[in-house]
Image (cartoon, rainbow, N blue to C red):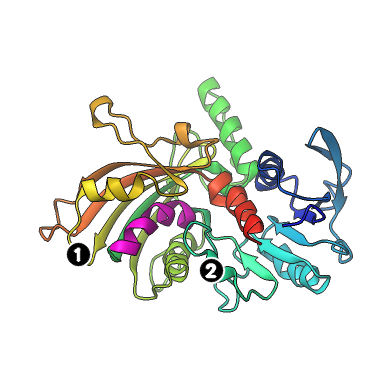
Amino acid sequence: MSSQNVVAIVGATGAVGVELIRCLEERNFPLAELRLFASARSAGKTLPFRGAPLTVRELTEGSFRGVNIALFSAGASTSRQFAPLAVRAGATVVDNSSAFRMQAEVPLVVPEINPQALRGHKGIIANPNCGAIISITPLWPIHKVNRIARLIVSTYQSASGAGAAAMEELRESTRAYLDGREYANKVLPHPYAFNLFSHNTRIDPATGYNEEETKIREEARKIFGDPDLRVAATCIRVPVLRAHSVSITFECEQPITPAQVRALLEDAPGVKLVDDPERNHFPMPRDASGQDAILVGRIRQDLSDPSGRSIALFVSGDQLLKGAALNAVQIAELL
């Protein structure tokens, strides 16, 4: 990487955009200039970077002149419109939306799993779905030595996955609930305080799976390079601010024990074992919030599988970090 990089963040004022700025600063990403872009209504705001305020500019078709790397986190429609313009201007795009993830020519990258997928990219690199990243990153060290043939996940997804407005709705609706006041939810389809509900994406009438569940299945297959991986997902929105948790049961091709899983994960990149049965201390979103690593624990044999090939475990990971901003910055570091 060069200290002469000019880096742009599209969607800089959103929850992920703010974390992108922080990650670039904390990881001392080499750059000569950071440019912040957002919609017209956010233009003129300032955000801190390396001790100085940076002014947010309105995103336009000419925003990418001189930009080397553009980090997008502004939604699929914005990415579809502006990412090709950024590439034509000479930038490499790391896109956090769903716009390009399943396009065959676009790498879908988790640096701990498939950094080699970056070779031969055509200007756009996709950052995976947060639920997919947090679910499968801890499984890769296992999959490499004992192929995972089947994966069952139940996600407990935080407000941050729906953006800053959903996080604020959780705060405000909780205050109202505790005060005994009525609160009309505007961002999410159901009351959020002290409640949980099926993930707020469209359900496919043919399969019964919502879009988030389908993303986890298809993206896991693409990232692992294993189109035959069998995946069933259930995605639930829970009243947690910023860390997703996932209950996972996986079936390997060969028998596997909890001790083998712990050994494989002990020094694995991007994960941290939190597995203390004596104190009943396992991964929690409270602990995962603000951490780069995905927490892994509750590792146990799946007793419903007499073949000994299945393991159950539980993970928590910061949706704004490894689930979004951190993974994007790691991709930029690889570039």
The three-letter amino acid code for the residue at tag 2 is Gln
Is residue 184 visible in this depiction of the protein?
A: no
Dominant secondary-structure state across the stretch colored magenta:
helix
Disc 2 + disc 1, Cβ < 8 Å: no
Camera-side residue of 116 and 56:
116
* Mark 1 residue element: loop
Quadrant of res 242: top right
Is residue 72 visible in this depiction of the protein?
A: yes
Which residue is situated farthest in the left direction here? 306
Q: In which quarter of the image is the C terminus?
A: bottom right
Q: Give the range drawn in magenta.
A: 131-145
Which residue is situated farthest in the bottom direction here? 104
Which residue is situated farthest in the front direction here? 2
Please name the residue that numbered disc 2 is placed on.
116
Q: Is residue 82 left or right of residue 225?
A: right
Q: Nearer the viewer, mark 2 or mark 1?
A: 2
